[in-house]
Structure formats: C-alpha cells, structure tokens
C-alpha cells in the first residue's frame, strides 16, 4: 500500500510510513482512520492502459486525484531505439534457436536409410526449407508463422 501526505504531496509506502513513526504501535492492518489521523490518504491502484507489444509498456506517472480519492497514474511508454534493437536481436536469436531445434528434430527424414517414401521425403524437404526461410518472413522476429509438420 502507498500513502499520500496531504501537506507535502509526497507518496510513501506503508513500510516507510511505519518506519517514520517507529514510536507508534500500529495494528497489522492500517485502517482508514489511522491513515487519516496522520494526515495521509491511501493511494489506490489506478487503471493501466493497454499497450501494443513489443515496444510499448506501462509506466508509472505519479498519482492523481479522482473524485476525492488518490490513484496511481499510468501512461503508455515506448522503449528507446537502442533497447528496441536489443529486444529484436534477443527475439531473433530465440526464434532461430527454436527453428534450429525443429530442423534437428527432423534431420532423420533426410537420411538415405529413412523409412519415408519419396513423397514423404519431399514433404519433409519442403517443411525444412520453409523453416530455413523463417528469418525472411515479414514481421520477423515478432510475428512468425511456423509451418505445420508434414503428415
């Protein structure tokens, strides 16, 4: 829980409030009356806006008064370009790792002694080629369409 000092406008945590008033014995759960008697208002959780992943996130932007009550205020923020580049690189690495594992899992289909007939082997070759082209898909690395496994 957070509390807002009516006089200064400062917002503190409940543990800071208790620490600032060490000589006062408080019950385990602070009541509205206790908070009020010390000149504070509780800060309630405000609504969080929707974001568009992966580059937007919700950021705290202080508190605001709505109809006589105080609420946390949140805004949509966007990562800077350097962070976006790092996020893209991490995501691309994860997608390629997944793709490489999918390729490794079906290596057996291309061996000379594979039990597959020519049609089956061809279906697996197409699957594997589609996997190799994943990094060239539009929207890579955030929007990837994985090919279905051959039957």
Image: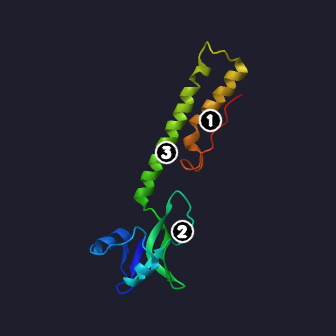
**Which dot, 1 or 2, sits closer to the camera?**
2
**Which dot, 3 or 1, sits closer to the camera?**
3
Residue occupied by mark 2: 48
Q: Secondary structure at mark 1?
A: helix
List x then y, in percent, for residue 79. Answer: 45, 62
List x then y, in percent, for residue 114. Answer: 63, 15
Figure quadrant of the C terminus? top right
Q: Is 6 on the left-hand or right-hand side of 70?
A: left
Distance from disc 2 to disc 3, alpha carbons, whole Å, reads: 29 Å
In terms of depth relative to the viewer, which is nearer, 137 or 58?
Answer: 58
At 45% across and 70% down in the image, what residue appears? 60
The quarter of the picture where residue 12 lies is bottom left
Q: Which of the two discs, 2 and 3, labels the residue nearer the N terminus?
A: 2
At 50% across and 59% down in the image, what residue appears? 55
The circle drawn on residue 130 is 1
Q: Secondary structure at mark 2?
A: loop
Distance from disc 3 to disc 1, alpha carbons, whole Å, reads: 16 Å
Q: Is 50 on the left-hand or right-hand side of 85?
A: right
Query: As displayed, is residue 145 above or below residue 129?
Result: below
CB-based contact (under 8 Å), mark 3 and mark 1: no
Q: Which of the two discs, 3 and 1, labels the residue nearer the N terminus?
A: 3
In terms of depth relative to the viewer, which is nearer, 24 or 133?
Answer: 24
The circle drawn on residue 92 is 3
Distance from disc 1 to disc 2, alpha carbons, whole Å, reads: 40 Å
Q: Secondary structure at mark 3?
A: helix
Query: As displayed, is residue 106 above or below residue 140?
Result: above
The quarter of the picture where residue 127 lies is top right
List x then y, in percent, for residue 136. Answer: 57, 43
Figure quadrant of the N terminus? bottom left
**Which dot, 2 or 3, sits closer to the camera?**
2
The circle drawn on residue 62 is none
Q: Is 81 on the left-hand or right-hand side of 123?
A: left
């Amino acid at each position: 829980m957070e509390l807002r000092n009516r006089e200064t406008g400062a917002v503190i945590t409940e543990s800071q409030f208790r620490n600032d008033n060490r000589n006062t014995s408080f019950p385990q759960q602070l009541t509205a009356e206790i908070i009020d008697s010390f000149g504070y208002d509780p800060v309630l959780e405000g609504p969080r806006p929707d974001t568009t992943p992966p580059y937007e996130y919700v950021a705290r932007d202080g508190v605001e008064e709505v109809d006589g009550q105080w609420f946390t205020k949140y805004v949509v923020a966007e990562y800077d370009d350097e962070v976006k580049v790092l996020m893209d690189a991490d995501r691309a690495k994860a997608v390629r790792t997944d793709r490489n594992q999918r390729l490794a899992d079906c290596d057996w289909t291309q061996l000379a002694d594979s039990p597959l007939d020519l049609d089956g082997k061809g279906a697996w070759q197409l699957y594997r080629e589609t996997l190799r082209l994943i990094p060239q898909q539009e929207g890579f690395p955030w929007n990837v369409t994985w090919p279905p496994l051959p039957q």
